[in-house]
């Protein structure tokens, strides 16, 4: 049996105070859904099986270009991070995997595997880092990595990615995510075509080192840290990369990596249609890549993304097995609380999308009834599925109210006493 960080008594006490009301709310919602021909238990069962990975770096306090203000009990290393991830998993029962970032999380792979297994955690996709310089790094990535003009720098970046694959093989990971910050800050600084050609050639070397049962995820971002041009700047470029590399290459969609007003759900549909959707980094944004809590700004957009995902799931779309991960920067909140609520919000969007009357929607689409077609989505979105989510957590051993149980346990104060305080610093995320 897996160990738990927070005592079972704390969770049981928290649940006992809420269970009666939850059962009444669940029965009431079940009756209303039954009138729509929807079995509430079937939706709950699907929610129970839906999972999203936690990024190891997400449990630390984030920052901006201007400053970083560490919170009490900051994780000191990857092993502290694993313990924080175990808390999220215990209370939400929605986050069974952790995604590592190398070299930030570099440690003996066997020790990492043992530490995770204590809490019933597994490892998701490996993430390489060639967008910043490691302490003992020979060549700098200041002017790029996989697209760098210098062949030695490109080779160093390739070898780092191959090392990530080797670490991941020991950990049981099955995917490598590659995001680069390569680009330019001034017109004329780089030759666009030559830089992209160098990138593709370097990625082909990485792809060649991929095990047969692995996937390679490439991630696009329209700007930052390079503000004039970015080598992998949009989903179209990302799609070209995946097509060029081969069948094991897929596109990763980060919800914050798009210009304002871009129709992300349509991008998702296109990538599904052409069998190149690899997965998601869930977050939210207001102005750019803000990495805010999932669903905190535009929960309807998150629902519309899941509307496309559920449509593909129910229609049996070929090759449809997207990976799900949170990717956020928590500057002013407790990262554990934010990640718990974000995992719940992703589940919420999934549950709401499962409530869409697909047959009626298709009928309205085919008869060009725009008003009723959009109402089919609104009916599902307006449905309060909280009783379904809470019952799924209760049934699987989690907390009806994860944040309440977490605060009652006093976990943050406990780790603050055990982990030395970290001094504030200049800009940059963890």
Image (cartoon, rainbow, N blue to C red):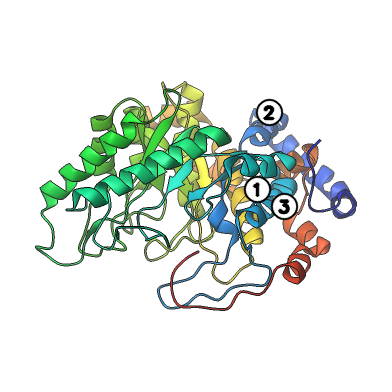
Could you say whether the residue bearing mark 2 is in a helix, strand or loop? helix
Residue 248 image position (x, y, % from top left): 36, 27
Question: In the rendered structure, are the residues bearing label 3 and label 1 in contact, judged by CB atoms less than 8 Å apart?
Answer: no
Residue 233: tell me if it is visible: no
Q: Which residue is drawn at 63% across and 62% down?
A: 75
Q: In which quarter of the image is residue 140?
A: bottom left
CB contact under 8 Å: marks 2 and 1: no
Q: Earlier in the sequence, mark 2 or mark 1?
A: 2
Label 2 neighbour load within 10 Å: few <14, some 14-19, many 20+: few
Q: Nearer the viewer, residue 64 or 172?
A: 172
Which one is in front in this view, the residue at disc 2 or the one at disc 3? 3
| Residue located beneath label 3 in the image | 87
Q: Looking at this view, is 334 or 198 the one in front?
A: 198
Q: Position of residue 187 (x, y in %)?
A: 11, 65
Kindly identify the residue that appears in the image at 78 percent across and 39 percent down. 2
Q: Are marks 2 and 3 in contact (CB under 8 Å)?
A: no
Q: Look at the image and tell me in which quarter the N terminus lies.
A: top right
Pointer 2 residue: 42
Residue 371, placed above or below residue 260? above
Q: Looking at the image, can residue 235 be seen?
A: yes
Choose mark 2 or mark 1, whichever is in front. Answer: 2
**Which circle marks residue 384 in the picture?**
1
How far apart marks 2 and 3 lie (CA) works out to: 27 Å
Give neighbour class at mark 3: few <14, some 14-19, many 20+ (Cα, 10 Å).
many
Q: Distance between the residues labelled 2 and 1?
A: 16 Å
Look at the picture and state if 278 lies above or below 418: above
Where is residue 264? Give x, y as percent: 37, 47
> Would you place residue 89 above or below residue 142 in this image?
above
């Amino acid at each position: 049996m897996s160990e738990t960080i927070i005592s079972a008594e704390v969770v049981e006490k928290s649940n006992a105070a809420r269970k009666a009301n939850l059962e009444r709310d669940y029965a009431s919602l079940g009756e209303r859904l039954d009138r729509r021909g929807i079995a509430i238990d079937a939706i709950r069962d699907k929610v129970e099986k839906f999972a999203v990975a936690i990024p190891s770096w997400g449990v630390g306090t984030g920052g901006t270009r201007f400053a970083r203000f560490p919170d009490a009990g900051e994780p000191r290393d990857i092993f502290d991070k694993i313990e924080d991830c175990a808390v999220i998993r215990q209370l939400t029962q929605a986050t069974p995997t952790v995604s590592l970032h190398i070299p930030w999380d570099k440690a003996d792979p066997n020790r990492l595997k043992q530490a995770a297994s204590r809490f019933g955690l597994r490892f998701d996709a490996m993430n390489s880092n060639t967008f910043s310089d490691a302490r003992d790094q020979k060549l700098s990535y200041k002017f790029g990595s996989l697209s760098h003009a210098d062949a030695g720098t490109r080779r160093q970046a390739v070898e780092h990615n191959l090392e990530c694959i080797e670490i991941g093989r020991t950990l049981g990971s099955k995917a490598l995510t590659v995001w680069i910050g390569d680009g330019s800050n001034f017109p004329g600084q780089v030759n666009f075509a030559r830089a992209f050609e160098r990138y593709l050639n370097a990625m082909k070397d990485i792809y060649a080192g991929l095990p047969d049962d692995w996937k390679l995820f490439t991630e696009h971002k329209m700007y930052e840290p390079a503000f004039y041009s970015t080598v992998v700047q949009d989903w179209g470029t990302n799609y070209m990369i995946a097509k060029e590399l081969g069948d094991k290459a897929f596109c990763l969609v980060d919800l914050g990596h798009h210009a304002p007003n871009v129709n992300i759900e349509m991008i998702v549909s296109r990538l599904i249609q052409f069998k190149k959707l690899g997965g998601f980094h869930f977050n939210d944004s207001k102005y750019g890549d803000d990495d805010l809590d999932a669903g905190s700004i535009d929960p309807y957009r998150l629902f519309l993304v899941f509307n496309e995902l559920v449509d593909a799931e129910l229609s049996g779309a070929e090759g449809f097995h997207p990976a799900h991960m949170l990717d956020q920067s928590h500057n002013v909140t407790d990262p554990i609380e934010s990640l718990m609520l974000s995992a719940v919000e992703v589940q919420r969007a999934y549950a709401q999308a499962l409530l869409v009357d697909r047959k009626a929607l298709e009928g309205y689409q085919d008869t060009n009834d725009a008003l009723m077609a959009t109402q089919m989505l609104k009916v599902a979105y307006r449905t309060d599925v909280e009783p379904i989510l809470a019952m799924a957590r209760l049934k699987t051993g989690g907390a009806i109210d994860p944040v309440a149980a977490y605060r009652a346990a006093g976990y943050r104060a406990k780790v603050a006493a055990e982990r030395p305080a970290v001094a504030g610093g200049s800009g940059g995320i963890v």
